[in-house]
Amino acid sequence: MTVSIIKYSKHKESRGENYTIYDKSLIANDFSYDKVSTSHKGVIRGFHGDSYTTKLISILHGSVKLVTYDLNNHLKQEFIISSDDDEVVTVLIPPNHLNAHQCLSDKCIFFYKWDHPYSLEKQYSVQYNDKIINPNWFNLKPIVSERDLKSENLNELIDRIS
């Protein structure tokens, strides 16, 4: 399974917008857990993932650069997603994929559905600026958590889980 992009139209009117971010007829996952993170411009979160969770990601506010990395096929994908776009873009990320994002606007609201509850103990974490993944983050002053600064590199993760 690879990362999938699902697009929905927005209904725009004088009061605002109305749109879908999840339609079970298009995405056959049984999601059980929702998470929201807010970030300020320059914040980078990730790379995180695990061997069993599928995530459906949407940007509710702002613009982000989203980078995914397929641990099985060693494939990187990059996306720029904005809540101001004419279409709603949701990204389905399967197990064994790392993901990270950088907030490009003053504030970002990142929404994701998980098909398993979050488990820090079972989650992979790779350095936000791993040289092999080479995420090419925008030249904004990066704001990164201690966890993401001290995470292992991609080769260390691959050696550990192989």
Image (cartoon, helix red, strand yellow):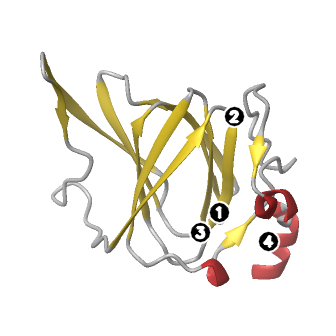
Front residue of this view, candidates 83 and 162? 83
Q: Which residue is mark 3?
A: 96
Q: Is residue 63 above or below residue 68?
A: above
| Residue 43 vs residue 48, the one in the foreground | 43
Q: Nearer the viewer, mark 1 or mark 2?
A: 2
* Disc nearer the start of the sequence (4/2): 2
Q: Are marks 1 and 2 in contact (CB under 8 Å)?
A: no
Residue count near mark 1 (Cα–Cα under 10 Å), binned few <14, some 14–19, many ≥20: many
Residue 54, quarter of the rendered image:
bottom left
The CA distance from mark 1 to mark 4 is 13 Å
* First reached walking from the N terminus: tag 2 or tag 3: 2
**Can you tell which of label 4 and label 2 is closer to the viewer?**
2
List the residue tagged with mark 1: 48
Task: For the C terminus, give its image quadrant.
Answer: bottom right
Looking at marks 3 and 1 on the same chain, the residue that comes earlier in the sequence is marked by: 1
At label 2, the amino acid type is Gly
Residue 148 placement, left or right of 5: right
Does residue 162 lie above or below 1 as drawn? below
Judge from the rendering whether residue 153 lies leftward or rightward of residue 51; answer left or right: right
Residue assigned mark 2: 42
Residue 162 appearing in the image = no
Mark 3 → mark 1, Cα distance in angstroms: 10 Å
Could you tell me which residue is drawn at 73 percent across and 66 percent down? 125
Discs 4, 2 touching: Cβ within 8 Å: no
| Residue 34 locus on image (x, y percent) | 37, 64
Labels 3 and 1 touching (C-beta < 8 A):
no
Residue placed at 66% from the left, 83% from the top?
121
The local secondary structure at tag 2 comes to loop
* Amino acid at dot 1: His
